[in-house]
Structure formats: C-alpha cells, structure tokens
Amino acid sequence: MAIPSKYDASKVEDKWYDYWMKNNYFHSTPDEREPYTIVIPPPNVTGVLHMGHMLNNTIQDVLIRRARLLGKNACWVPGTDHASIATEAKVVAKLKEQGISKSDLTREEFLKHAFDWKDEYGGIILEQLRKLGASCDWERTAFTMDPEMSESVIKVFVDLYNKGLIYRGYRMVNWDPEAKTTLSDEEVIHEERQGNLYYLEYKIEDSTDTLTIATTRPETIFGDTAICINPNDERFTHLKGKKAIVPLCNRVIPIIEDEYVDLEFGTGCLKVTPAHDENDKNLGDKHNLEVIDIFNEDASLNSFGLHYQGKDRFVVRKEVAKELEEKGILVKTEVHTNKVGTSERTKAVIEPRLSDQWFLKMTDLAKPAIDAVLGNDNEINLVPKKFENTYRHWMENVRDWNISRQLWWGQQIPAYFYGDGKEDFVVEENIEKALELAKLKTNNQKLSTKDLRQDEDALDTWFSSWLWPMSVFDGIRNPENEEIKYYYPTNDLVTGPDILFFWVARMIVAGYEYKDQKPFENVYLTGLVRDKQRRKMSKSLGNSPDALKLIEEFGADGVRVGLLLSAPAGNDILFDEDLCQQGKGFANKIWNAFRLIKGWEIDENLAQPETAKIGLAWYEAKFQKALAEIEDHFSKYRLSDALMTIYKLIMDDFSSWLLEIVKPAYQQPIDKKTFDAIIEVLENNLKVLHPFMPFLTEEIWQHITERTSDEALIIAKYPEKKAFDAAIISNFDFATGVVSGIRTIRKEKNISFKDAVELFVVDNDRATKEFDEVIQKLTNTATINYVSDKVDGASFRVKSNEYFVPISAANIDVEAELKKLNAELKRAEGFLFGIQKKLSNERFVSNAPEKVIELERKKEADTLAKIETIKSSLNSLQ
C-alpha cells in the first residue's frame, strides 16, 4: 500500500471500524481465557453524545482494548436506559405536535407511540459511540425495556414483595407537577432561591384578637387545618384552646400546641397544612387534623382553591398576596432565602403530596453493600477513595425507596386489584398467576381476569437499571446460566459520581441480594467535564462543543487524547480544544516518524553501526521502564498519567532521540538489522498506544507489512515486561545533557551543523563514554578528547564534567560575543554579591536552617564556577 503523505483521520476511521466489525473482534463468548467485563452505564434512550459520554466511554474503551491486547476475553456490553420521565415527556410533546393528547389514548396505544419513538431515535447515541471508536460487543446491545429485561424486573419486584421488603403506603412524596409523577428523594435537587416571607393576620373566633403567621406560600392557606403554637411561648397563652379563622375561605380551625414550633422563627405561630408539607403532615397525624389537598396533579388549584380554581400555584401566589393585601390581611412582606426542591429531570419545583405509592425497605438491604465498600475486606474499590465518605453518608442514612411512578413508559407494577379496598390486591408476575392467587385469597373461584385491574403505575427507571450487571447476562431469570457464571462479577465500572447513589450503590445492593456477590470489583468515578472557566458544560450555557464536530475536526484519536490528557481520576476535567489539537498533532508526529522509517533504503550487506546498537539497547531499557510505569498507572486508574508516559516515550525518546541515533546519513541506506529492530520498536510503541489511539495505530500497523485478519493490531499480543538496565538510562540522560550543551553552543555561536566541532572533556565521571559515538553523530563532533586541564573555548557543565568546544574566531562575530559574555559576567557577579552578602551576615547564618545555608553555599559555588567559565571564554576571544 502506498503511504499517504498526510494522516487523514476521516479516511481511516470508518475503514478500520468496519474492518473490526466485519472480523467480529468486539464479540465475546465464554471460553478458557480469563474474562474481563465492563457493562456500559446505559445512556438515556433520549440522549445524544455529549462531553461526559465522550470521556466516560473513551475510558471504558481504553480499558477494554488493553484487556484484549493482554489476552483476556474482553466483553463490553452496550445498551440504553428507557429513562421513563425524560422519554415519556418527549413522546407526549411529539404527540401534542400531532394534535394528540396522552389522555385520549389507551396505555397500549401510548406505548406503541413510545416504542416507535424509541425505534426512530433511541439508537442515535450508540451509533455516535462507534464514531468515537467504542469497541462494544454490539451483538449484546440491551435495552432496559427489552422483554427479557422487563421480565427480570417484574420477577425481582414479586420476590421482594413476597419477602416483605416492598409495601404500599399512603405517604408524603415528592411530586413533579410537570412530569406528573413522584420522584425519590435522590431525584430532588435542593437549590437556594430568593423569595418572600408573607406575614398574614388570622382572626380568632368569637374575639377581636388576631394572630400573625409568616409563610413563604400564601397560596396554601386554602389547605390550612390548624394553627400551632409552642406551649412554652408566653406570648400566646391567651390563645390556648381557641380557634382561628382561615382568611378568604373563612374555615374555622383549631389552635394546637406543640414544641415542634420554633420560638425564634417568624412570629412563633405556625400555619399547619398537612397535605402540602412533610413536617405539617407529621403534626397533623399527631393531632388528628383534617387533611385538605388543594392541588391538581399539575399543581394548579382544585375546587378547595375557590375562585382560584384551575390557576397555577405560582400565579395564585401573586394574585392571592394581592387580594390579602387589599383586604388588610397581609401585614408585611420580607425578602427571604430558602431551599427549594426541584426535579432533576424537568427542573420543575417539587410539590410535597400525599398519595398511595410503592416503597422498598432499604435499611437491611443496604448492610451488605455498606460492608462491601467500607468493610475490612474492601471487596469493592471506589476510585478515588474520597467518594467513600459520600457513599457512607448516603448508605448509612438510607430511606425507603419510593419505586412507583405515575407514568406509562416503564415496567408496569405487577399488582392486581380484585376489589375497591386499598388492600384488595395480589402481586404476581402475570395476570394468570395473579388470578390463581386472588381466587385463593378471596376463596372465590368465580373470579376471572376481567375482575382484575392492574396497578396503573410504572416502576422507577432505576429499579430496572439496578439489575443491569446481572440482567444483561440473564442472571435473574436463569441464575445458573453459563454467561452469568463466566462474566459475573464484572471487573470495572466507569461512571460519574452524580449517580453513585442512584445507580452504583443500588447495583451493589441488588448484587448481594440476588447473587450474594459484588457486581463489580472497581468503580472508577470520572469528574465532570467543565470549560476553561470551570463552568459545567451544558446545553443551556452553550459551552458544550458538538462531540461529532470535534471528531470531524481533530479525528477520534485526537479527541480521545485531548479528553484523557485533561482527565485525572475523580477530578473535574477542564476541557480545552487545544488539547484535542495536541492530540491531532501527536497523531501527525507519529505518522511522520513512520513515513521517515519507511522511506529508508535497506542494504542487507551493511554491518550494524555501534551507534545504532547502543541506541537500541538504551531504548529497550527506556521502553521497559515506561511499560512498568504504565502498568502502575493503570493499576491506580491514572489513565491520564499512563497516556502521558506513552506520549513522552514516543515524542521524546523515540522520535527525538532514537530515530536521530539510527537515522542513516543523507541519501545513504540503513542496515537490515537496525531497520528490523526499529520496526519492532515501532510495533511495540503502537501496541501500548493502541488503547488510546486505536485508528491511527491500526492504520500504521497495517501499512508496516501485509497482515492477515489474525494479525490485526486490535488482537495483537501486548509487550511483555522484562528486567531492564537502569544504569544505561541514567547514563544516556547524562549523554543527552552533553548533546544539548553542544547544540546550545552551536546555536549561540551560530556554528553551522555542517561544520564539525571538537569537544574536550575535563572528565570526573566516565558515565557517558559508552555514548561518545552517539554524541558525535548527533552533534557532528569530529573528536572527543579527554583532558586533565581546561581548554580555551565555549564551555558548559554536565554534573561534575566540564566540556569545552574550541571556537574559531573566523566562525563567529567576536564583538557581539564579547558584548554578550560581558553582560552575562555582570549578571553573574551581581548575583554572587547578593549571595555572599547574605552568607557574611552572622544573624542569617546563625538563625537560618542548615538546609537553607547549604543551598546558599551551593549557589555560591555554582556561580563562582560559572564566572570562571565566562572569564575563560572572554580570554579565549581577546
């Protein structure tokens, strides 16, 4: 194949992805190899690729590709989550555009529209992941509402119900008026918002007295069923046992006493609205108060709201405040900041609401999951460790999980009512089994399926996805099947800390309940992707780049490198497109290095030069050292550091040093032994780089020589770790110091590389001698002379050795050089004066720490040596 002059990612990426797919490299089936398994955090079926997905899936792909190279049976299971609230909202909006209301449809009709929507849009994000290079086992693609997945969810619900862990209760829940469903506590985000505190005057029955209450929600007065005072509050002794009249609706309500009332807050009198505040509900239960629900499901007021019926709660707040003010009931208004609960999904302000819901008891279920992460055995490892505190706080304060949602898109709760009473139901996997159970429970053999009515609610999406590592291998329905036994527990989970409780903790709970085993060994928690100004990337801010456009501009490999270079584990990622440019530049550098190598003519009769032999020996040691570092970084999930080690190895050690050492002279051939060795070095570089830059590496790999499908890089054998000579690495570092010194003199003195120079060494450390030929080749040095005394010329030091390059006056501008050296001498002498002044100060010497004195003395010695060198250079020119 002809090698293109430039690397064009757009022509390469589809070609190799199709090739990998055609050869089925991503697919895994159980065999004798060690399995390595990752399950994808299933993105919402409504989703499109954003920067968080890009980072998360790049990390997973790096881990899975590396496992494949290490000879493991790598299985990465992809899929999507049905995302009940988000998807139902999208389907309802689409139907609305077509003039169809959800309420006009049966559940079955609505679900057909929902599945049609899913079929049309649901695969977009998975298709986009292919563009990134994600090597998922696409044959295993799962969807949380696939029939077998739903069957697993229903099976678990029935099992937990039969164990007494799921119950139905009339509770105060978080109500999302936009999605018209309940939310669990964890799906509510509490935000500080500025509002008003309204002071309202209530009349006392059969009296001219009044009392004042302070409320942030004047619209809820229609649901007031008591006024509460603290029994210890002497200000209100005269109100004990009396009744108050609720403004506007003129309902008479009792004045009750309870120490719950804060004497310091507001006026000391509290209005009690049991239907619309959890604390008020607790007071109401304690004092047997009436419960009046004033809201419809969309948070507009119902008939209890009198002339405000049908109006939105926030509209009513303004209008009722105005009416109260006009009637002299609103005494004053103050600006007040308080925490407001909002829906994570719809952003709507949450309304506390009483309703019948299904709950899962979590306290006992959580115990094994707490031990797994925080116990002595540390079965599950969170990376970074700092998230263990977050995990502990959530899990040790866990509340019963509200698992029912007032939606149609999701698994329908398998509870079947056979009567009108709240307890007239049975729980079974299907209606046929439910009928048998209902007959048994009622002792009524005449019951038929027509007499049964299934609960309308669907299950919380998380109740489906908490089974994900088991259900994708059919481990719930068929717990002893070959796949679950082979792939479970999985190895690594890569996800964001924002769903550590929602998903990660719950999967751990489910894993111990249903497999008595952890679901995964390690949880790698990525940070949030932020822009350069540290703002979270979001559509609303318009600061989130289009993921596919980035791939188009920089290539998938460039974007992967850009993301990973800025992604330390658990810390937020400050994303900068310049890093993608750096990734693209890195790809070009490797491509050009490869073209350079392939452009060399080979002469099979040439002997291998000593320089090449030494350079290759050094690089082998350097490569092995890097390999050990990469291994260490991977073990600690420091993927950014692993990539940086590879980046420096290829950019600096390989491209800047090794290729220069072995490169044949202009228009001269290279010996076969060196060429073959360089190709082997290149191939090993490609192997360690492949997980990070799969497309570029496969393209070069396939250009090196003709390969069969069994020889593709994606399934090649990862380089083996071997013992290495650390001394040759440190000695070479010494030698590079010498090369840099000579190059600096050439640059400063404007000596052409074509002109050979001589080098004299006052040698106290023989470390570089084995690299003398390398130094000569890289600097065009005719001879290296080891001498005992200094030689006239430009000089530099490397450790304890002093090096001299005699300068011919014919080659340089003597006047300019003298001017420069005199300026350098003046600066050095000024610096020396400052140091010596400090060291001659007795107070400084007697009070400063020994290390500080030592450092100052070293500075003095170095500066004296530098002055001597400059003077020597000046003498040689005068």
Image (cartoon, grey):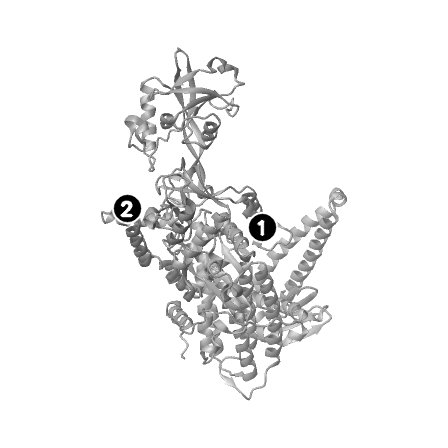
> Picture coordinates of residue 534 (x, y %)?
47, 47
Q: From this viewpoint, is residue 459 visible?
A: no
The percent position of residue 850, horizontal first and vertical second, equals 75, 49
Q: Is residue 76 visible?
A: yes
Residue at the limit of the structure toward the bottom, as seen here: 605
Of the numbered discs 2 and 1, the one sitting upstream in the chain is: 2
Q: Secondary structure at mark 2?
A: helix
Q: Amino acid at mark 2?
A: Lys
In the picture, the disc for residue 102 is: 2
Query: Residue tagged by mark 1?
Result: 368
Q: Is residue 283 above or below residue 568?
A: above
Q: Amino acid at mark 1?
A: Pro
302 and 384: which one is in front?
A: 302
**Quadrant including the C terminus:** bottom right
Picture coordinates of residue 199 (x, y %)?
41, 21
In the shown orientation, is residue 164 left or right of residue 330?
Answer: right
Q: Quadrant of residue 22?
A: bottom left
Q: Could you tell me which quadrant the N terminus lies in?
A: bottom left
- Does 170 sit above or below residue 757? above
The reply to whether callout 2 and callout 1 are in contact (CB within 8 Å) is no
Q: CA distance from mark 2 to mark 1?
A: 42 Å
Q: Relative to the observer, which residue lies in front, 29 or 89?
A: 29
Total residue callouts: 2
Is residue 74 shown above or below 442? below
Packing grade of label 1 (10 A; few <14, some 14-19, many >=20) is: some
State the residue at coordinates (51%, 23%): 258
Quadrant in the picture for residue 320: top left
Are there few (<14), some (14-19), or many (20+) residues within 10 Å of tag 2? Answer: some
Image location (x, y in percent) of residue 611 = 60, 78
- Determine whether the residue tagged by mark 1 lies in a helix, strand or loop: helix
